[in-house]
Amino acid sequence: MTGTFAIVGSGPSGFYAAEALARKAKGCHIDIFDRLPTPYGLVRGGVAPDHQGTKNIVRVFERLMAKGQVRFLGHVTIGRDLSLDELRAHYDGVIVATGAPLDRHLAIPGADLPGVHGSAAFVGWYNGHPDHVDLNPDLSGRNVVIIGNGNVAIDIARVLTKTPAEMARGDLADHAARAIHQAAFETVTIAGRRGPVEASFTDAELAELGELERVTPRVDPTVIPETIGSGWDPATAKVKERNLEILRGFAQRSDTRPVTLNFAFNCAPVRFVGDERVSAVRFARTRVEDGRAVATGTEFEMPADLVVTAIGYRNPGLAGLPMDETRGVVVHDQGRVDAGLYVVGWAKRGPSGVIATNRADSMAVVDRLLAEVTPGAKDGGGGIDTVLAERGVPVVTFDQWQRIDAAERAAAAGDAPRRKLVRLEDMLAAAQED
Ligand code: NAP
């Protein structure tokens, strides 16, 4: 097959789409664009620095790149260096895989106070994402409140409380390691607007919080129900039952380590309190009715020197893409957006599931694309290379990314897998080195 395909975004959903195209349309040419000089999206910038096992998925993507059918065009921003319409004019099919890199905003009074951060920015900061490297959160206070009951809230609580030794095999960015390891947090609270059964934690991640050297998890035993109730599918039920078991274990802990990790359920944030900066979060007590959090009429305040909202993400959109602004996703019909234009991953489904969830999703969309587009009608990467050269866009190739990768690995201290370059200029300089 002589088709030419462009993929916008080099995170897991984009790479899985490339893998499916390479396998199903042998002989086709695939170009993956990313606005950063570094590939792998969320695997590099979102997955927690101490979850290196999850990052091993990049080996699969490296093997794909080694076959030579796929090109990486890094440091090219679609919407600035090239338009989506230009990609559509040059490639038989275009797949948007731009994920959900922006925070869902918690629109309550005080949300803009210093000391309140969204998880996209905060996680990006500790993972050394160039967009967020200058966030410089003030970690000098005692009380941290993390809003949301998902795995991102757990990641943040864990990264903020692990000791340097517990983090030694991770790739926490230097600037974040310095700030976090100097902090003297006393309480970290993970606050959920619904109850323990409704929390979207997965059990392995929740259990990990019970194993941290400096942390005693605490939860009021009276809020943990005896059963999860009915109506859950078997796989979900198993996770929820395990979660309740783990929380019961936490409720029995009597040790007093330097950091208390509180689970506060049934509290919905209504206001961030503070003058110059945040000093507390005001919550409404809730009960769960028909699966929804309903305010009981009681409110209370919880001290907070640092707040991170971990309530989900959204796609930023792109000129030429129809958006569902409420959900922050691209409008599509089973992955098809328009003739020759498709969407995969979190840009399509919203921020849910684990990395592997994207494999089946991208494969299904690629099947649809291959059934619908006419391959070989357009000039593909050759034509686009001419446009990029005319505009003087300094494209970072996969070989050049491998130089960045090698420089980061060579600079790693101790057991760390890499020491991340966090500024674009440093990445671009490393890309040029022999
Ligand atoms: P998530 O699992 O959807 O959790 C979002 C949380 O925010 C929910 O508890 C939600 O409560 C809460 N929330 C939403 N709006 C709120 C509001 N206005 N006020 C208070 N709370 C609000 O999302 P996530 O934690 O961002 O994770 C995204 C995806 O990545 C998930 O699929 C997650 O499992 C995955 N992930 C996996 C790992 C891992 O496997 N280690 C690590 C990180 C992330 P309601 O339920 O009441 O809406």
Image (tube, rainbow, N blue to C red):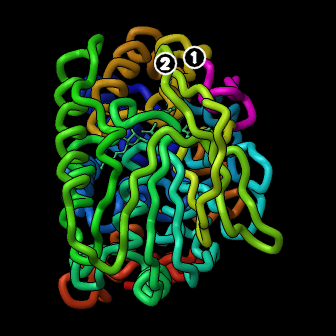
Identity, as a three-letter code, of the amino acid under mark 1: His
Query: Does 405 appear in magenta?
Result: no
Q: Nearer the viewer, residue 366 or 232?
A: 232
Query: Does 330 appear in magenta?
Result: yes
Principal secondary structure, stretch drawn in magenta = loop
The residue carrying pointer 1 sits among few (fewer than 14), some (14 to 19) or many (20 or more) residues within 10 Å by Cα, namely some
Picture coordinates of residue 225, whole percent (x, y): 29, 31
Q: State the separation of the CA atoms marked 1 and 2.
A: 5 Å
Picture coordinates of residue 369, whole percent (x, y): 43, 17
Which residue has dot 2 on it?
Answer: 335
**Is the C-beta separation of discs 1 and 2 under 8 Å?**
yes
Q: Is residue 294 left or right of residue 211?
A: right
On residue 144, which mark appears? none
The residue carrying pointer 2 sits among few (fewer than 14), some (14 to 19) or many (20 or more) residues within 10 Å by Cα, namely many
Q: Is residue 283 left or right of residue 257?
A: right
Picture coordinates of residue 408, whole percent (x, y): 35, 80
Identity, as a three-letter code, of the amino acid under mark 2: Gly
User: Looking at the image, which residue is at 40% across and 13% down?
Assistant: 368
Q: Is residue 204 above or below residue 168?
A: above
Q: Quadrant of residue 275?
A: bottom right
Q: Is residue 125 left or right of residue 243?
A: right
Which residue has dot 1 on it?
Answer: 332
Quick check: can you spot residue 29? no
Magenta span: 318-331
Q: Is residue 37 above or below residue 404?
A: above
Q: Nearer the viewer, residue 422 or 243?
A: 243
Quick check: can you spot residue 77? yes
